[in-house]
Image: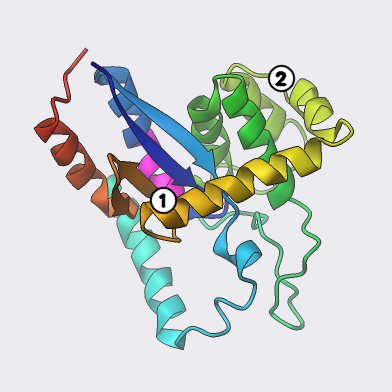
Amino acid sequence: MSLTFDLYWSFRSPYSYLVTDRIVALERDYDVKCNLRVVYPIAVRQPDFFANNDPLWITYFGKDIHRSAQFAGVPFRWARPDPVYMDPQTRTYPKEQPHIHRLSWLGVAASERGKGMAFIEQVGRLIWDGTVAGWNVGDHLSDAVARAGLDLAELDAAISALGEAERLDGIIAANQAAQREGGHYGVPLMVFEGEPFFGQDRFDQLVWRMGQKGLAKL
């Protein structure tokens, strides 16, 4: 019998990006199904989160994300542009955002079409692997979506339809509520049989636990 787990994932999280290839490979090689649940990043959910943290938090994060990417053998550079816009004068996050809502709605729409993991694999790589500056201009995004087996124009039209923004936001809000019920507020969060595994560095523990539950190779 196939095993299943939930993956709570954000387009602004480089750690979410770092774990994606491993989850795609896990689904490819094992009898397991990942249920992708897109959430908004903490900077959108709690705009004052970073302002209230000890300054060492961001200092450590800056070192750790590059080290983690090197350790995982995954190319990485901070996104250009950042999926979440920060006002450079006030260093705060405005409610109106140019990228993150569209990306998140597209991710939900891709999941509804059965292509969620392919979508975050290709789009996440575009945003974070450092190959391009300006992932949001030209054909970069449409090409990445095409590699996922989808059409960006069709997805954009779908998410722009009357009432879709509210519906998609409702799905994301439900995902965020389920995420907290799963045991953590951060991403990537993987929840298997009620047990939370927070962070890309807990992937091996997730696989180990599923192995105890009968995870089988295809």
Up/down of 100 relative to 193, above or below: below
- The quarter of the image holding the C terminus is top left
Q: Is residue 218 magenta?
A: no
User: What's the magenta region?
Assistant: 15-21
State the residue at coordinates (40%, 38%).
6
User: Which numbered disc covers residue 203?
Assistant: none
Residue 145 quadrant: top right
Q: Within the image, what quadrant is residue 27 found in?
A: top left
The Cα–Cα distance between marks 1 and 2, rounded to whole angstroms, is: 26 Å
Given residues 206 and 132, the one toward you in this image is 206
- Residue 163 in the image, given as x and y percentages of width and height: 85, 36
Residue 208, position as x, y percentages in the image: 14, 39
Scheme by which the image is coloured: rainbow
Location of the N terminus by quadrant is top left
Q: Amino acid at mark 1?
A: Pro
**Hey, which residue is sitting farthest left in the picture?**
212
Residue drawn 27% across and 53% down?
Answer: 201
Front-lying residue, 88 or 154: 154
Q: Is residue 47 left or right of residue 138?
A: left
Q: Earlier in the sequence, mark 1 or mark 2?
A: 2
Q: Kindly identify which residue carries mark 1.
A: 188
Q: Nearer the viewer, residue 173 or 100?
A: 173
